[in-house]
Image (tube, rainbow, N blue to C red):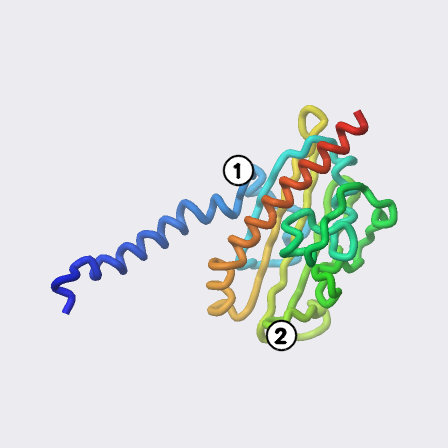
Amino acid sequence: MNEHRPWIGCVPFALAATAAAYGWFVRPRLLSWGATWEERVRAYPGDDLVPGPGSTWTMATTLPGPPEQVWPWLQQMGCNRGGWYSWNRLDNGGRPSAEHIVPQWQNLEEGQRLDSLPSGASWFTVAILVPDRTLVLRAALELPCGRPFDVHGGPLPRAYVDSVWGFHLAPASGGRTRLVVRSRSRSRPRPLTRPLDLLFGEPAHLVMQTRQFHNLRTRVGAAARQEG
C-alpha cells in the first residue's frame, strides 16, 4: 500500500531519533539554563519538601547588585503585590510588575500566602525564608481544578501537583549576586501528568523563568545606578 511512498516507513524512526535527541541533549540544557555544573548537582534548602520529584529545574543568572539589594525585590513578589517580574499577561492578570521597592510588602514571613492568581483562588506558601539568602515557595494544587490543598492535612488527592520554587542568593565578584532558582515538582497520576510536563510545563517554566531573570537584572541594575 505504501510502495509509492517509501518514506512513510521512515517516519517512526525519525520521530524516535528526534525524541532521543531532545531527551539526551536539548531537555537537560533547558532544565539547567544558565547554571553551572556545581550549581546543578548541589542540594538546596527546600529540596526535601518534594522527595522523589518527577521534574527538577536548576536555572541561574548573575544580577548587578549584592544580595541585600536583590532580596527586597524577591520579598514583594506575588499577585496583588509586586507581581512576578515575568510575562505579566500570563502570570499577573496583565498588571505590570512593580518597578520600585514598596515598603508595605517588605515584611514577608514563613507560612504567609502569596497569591499566584489575581483572584486569590490559588497561592504559594512561604516555606523557607532566610533574609538575603533563601526564599522557598511551595504550591500544592488538586487537579484539574487547581484548588490548593494542605499536604499535611490527610490523604493526597487522586490527581495533584506539589512543587517548590526556591530562590537562592550568593555574593558574586564585583558586588554582584548569583541567583540560583531550584524548582522541584511531583504530580499524580504520572501517565497523565508526565506528558503534560514535557509538552507544556517544562517549556512554559523556561519561558517564564528566563523572562523573570531578565526583568530582575533590569530592576536591580537600575536601582544600583540610582544609588550610585
Q: Amino acid at mark 2?
A: Pro
Residue 200: percent from left, percent from top? 51, 59
Q: Nearer the viewer, residue 36 or 201?
A: 201
Q: Nearer the viewer, residue 150 or 92?
A: 92
The residue lying at 79 percent from left, 41 percent from top is 100
Q: Are marks 1 and 2 in contact (CB under 8 Å)?
A: no
Q: Secondary structure at mark 1?
A: helix
Q: Is 195 above or below relative to 219?
A: below
- Give the quadrant of residue 65: top right
Q: Is 164 above or below relative to 121?
A: above
Give the residue at the far right of this rendering: 104
Q: Is 169 above or below relative to 14?
A: above
Pick the quarter of the image with the C terminus.
top right
Tell me, for residue 37, which label it has, or none. 1
Q: Nearer the viewer, residue 150 or 43?
A: 150
Residue 187: percent from left, percent from top? 56, 65
The residue lying at 55 percent from left, 54 percent from top is 204
Residue 81 horizontal side relative to residue 164, left or right: right
Residue 205: percent from left, percent from top? 57, 52
